[in-house]
Image (spheres, rainbow, N blue to C red):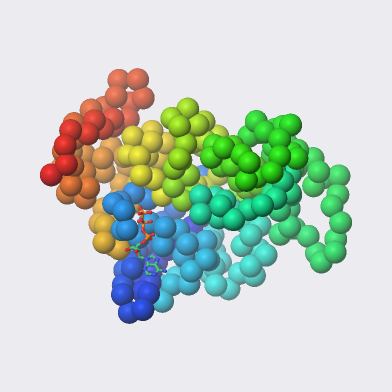
Amino acid sequence: MKLIMEDICHSIMETSIVEDISIQIETGKFIGIIGPNGSGKSTILKIASRILNPDKGSVQLDNYYLDQLPFKKTAQKMAVVSQETSLTFDFSVQEIVWMGRYPYKKLFQSDTAEDENIVSEALERVGLNGYENRNFMSLSGGEKQRVLIARALAQQAEIIILDEPTNHLDIRHQLQLMELVKKLNITVVAALHDLNIASMYCDYLYVIQDGRSVMSGTPENVLTKGKIRKVFGVETEVIMHPVTKKPHITYLTHI
Ligand SMILES: Nc1ncnc2c1ncn2[C@@H]1O[C@H](COP(=O)(O)OP(=O)(O)OP(=O)(O)O)[C@@H](O)[C@H]1O
């Protein structure tokens, strides 16, 4: 599933938050949105996932303009995983994963054996069998993120939008989550703070600064010493890591 955002602008009370954002995400690619705090990453993802409407510009999912797609169709195609939404859930793990099936249901339509298989397979893929009756709020940050990924799997989404998915996760759970998502082989767009994680998992990066897309390219092209200094204001050493064959950043000092 392809996602195209064209010339997106969004203001809040006459203050421009994002301006002229154009992003193209090809089917099956893992795209990272990086940039300093407050640069507009979450706003872009909220527009991509229809939580916010742009003042100007368009968002297309494959050949459909997002604002012309019924919400139910959008929900079948797109899953959103963010820390923010996870805080408001007070359901069991099973109930949350079942929510992934709702976009496929008509009013009062009951659940089928197929739904049940999909839900239990989703829980198995994220390693949460046996957690079905646990209250979501009682889970650790890593477990919560895995439940939300399981919901996305149950949703059989073709594109997944991740807003800082590894926040609050220890390094093992960060890697586990990123690997899990990467293995899904579906289109992924993720706002990421950790540049080494972005380097390891993303096929392509967009860099957002002050609400504008200031550069884009492969991690090799974007994650250079000079560009990181310009956007993030930090001195680094960047090497091509001999094992991962990806840029690896060591932070030295801020400017
Ligand atoms: N509802 C709102 N009202 C006023 N300002 C807002 C609102 N939502 C976002 N902003 C502002 O818009 C800017 C971009 O916010 P956004 O959350 O998109 O940035 P971000 O790059 O995701 O930040 P972070 O990395 O800190 O999560 C920030 O300056 C933020 O304060």
- Residue 207 visible at all: no
Of residue 117 and residue 36, the one placed in the foreground of this image is 36
Instruction: Work out which quarter of the rendered image holds the C terminus and state it.
Output: top left
The residue lying furthest to the front in this view is 138
110 sits left or right of 66 in the view: right
- Tell me the quarter of the picture where residue 109 sits: bottom right
Of residue 58 and residue 150, the one placed in the foreground of this image is 150
117 sits left or right of 177 in the view: right
Residue 21 at x, y percent in the picture: 34, 64
Residue 104 at x, y percent in the picture: 75, 58
The residue at 53%/69% (across/down) is 65
The residue lying furthest to the left in this view is 255
Instruction: Please give the count of numbered marks on the rendered protein.
Output: 0
The residue at 56%/42% (across/down) is 145
- Residue 141 visible at all: yes
Residue 207 at x, y percent in the picture: 30, 52
Of residue 119 and residue 251, the one placed in the foreground of this image is 251
- Tell me the quarter of the picture where residue 196 sits: top left
Residue 118 at x, y percent in the picture: 75, 42
Q: Is residue 5 above or below residue 101?
A: below
The residue lying furthest to the top in this view is 243
The residue at 84%/52% (across/down) is 111
The residue at 36%/71% (across/down) is 9
Quadrant where ligand 1 appears? bottom left
